[in-house]
Image (spheres, grey):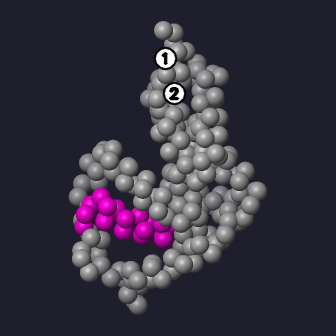
Amino acid sequence: MTATDTLHRQLEVMRPLLVRFAQLQIRNQALAEDAVQDALIAVLEKPERFNGQSSLRTYVTGILKFKIIDCLRASSRERQIDTAEDQSEDDAIDALFKADGHTREQPMAWGDPDATLEQKDFFKVLEICLEKLPAKTARIFMMREWLELETDEICKELAITTSNAWVLLYRARMRLRECLDLNWFGNRQAT
């Protein structure tokens, strides 16, 4: 078996994981598949660029991140994002806070974060929680936290204000915290 055959096999095994990663960001099956395909083609066209300083998965995911960013930029030019879906979230978010702005309940202790992050099942639950977020909220969260784009760049790409971006990021973090409390940490108290 040649080195090229081995590379093809490794990429084929990792493809479903890459598609799931891309879908979390793009929220469109066809576009996610295209981004993954572009990343895999980039690796296969110039395999000598992979010098083994990181794992192959890390290398391919790095390329995929840029393909996803390109896809998000292209799709943001094609259509505007509807903000109406996030307006319905206001009541649910407001219920988490008192009139003075403090939370009604203190966040539950989550244990040792480093040990939790090492568990693969945690990422499965995190993906499920991300999928439950409204599309725009999840998209902004993923652009900021996973793709590591700056807030100004996100605002420019999505044609929103900085204030709106921060509100959506806050909502995403609160919803993710609530979802993880309930579905991973099991700390939700009966009401």
Instruction: Return the residue found at the far right.
Output: 78
Q: Nearer the viewer, residue 159 or 14?
A: 14
Q: Nearer the viewer, residue 47 or 16?
A: 16
Residue 78 x, y percent position in the rendering: 76, 56
Which numbered circle lies on residue 148?
Answer: none
Q: How many numbered discs sit on the rendered protein?
A: 2
Q: Is residue 71 magenta?
A: no
Quick one: SS at disc 1?
helix
Q: Which residue is mark 1?
A: 6
Residue 141 x, y percent position in the rendering: 52, 60
Quick one: SS at disc 2?
helix
Which numbered circle lies on residue 11?
Answer: 2
Residue 46 x, y percent position in the rendering: 63, 22
Q: Is residue 74 left or right of residue 98?
A: right
Query: In terms of secondary structure, what is the magenta stretch mainly?
Result: helix
Q: Amino acid at mark 2?
A: Leu
Q: Is residue 180 magenta?
A: yes
> Can the viewer see residue 54 in this picture?
no
Measuring 71% from the left and 54% from the top, which residue is drawn there?
A: 75
Measuring 30% from the left and 71% from the top, which residue is drawn there?
A: 107
Q: Is residue 183 above or below residue 86?
A: above
Q: Is residue 51 left or right of residue 97?
A: right
Residue 160 x, y percent position in the rendering: 67, 69
Query: Which portion, as a residue range, is magenta?
Result: 169-187
Q: Amino acid at mark 1?
A: Thr
Q: Is residue 93 above or below residue 130?
A: below
Q: Is residue 13 above or below residue 96?
A: above
Between discs 1 and 2, the one toward the N terminus: 1
Q: Which image quadrant for residue 47?
A: top right
Q: Is residue 58 left or right of residue 182?
A: right
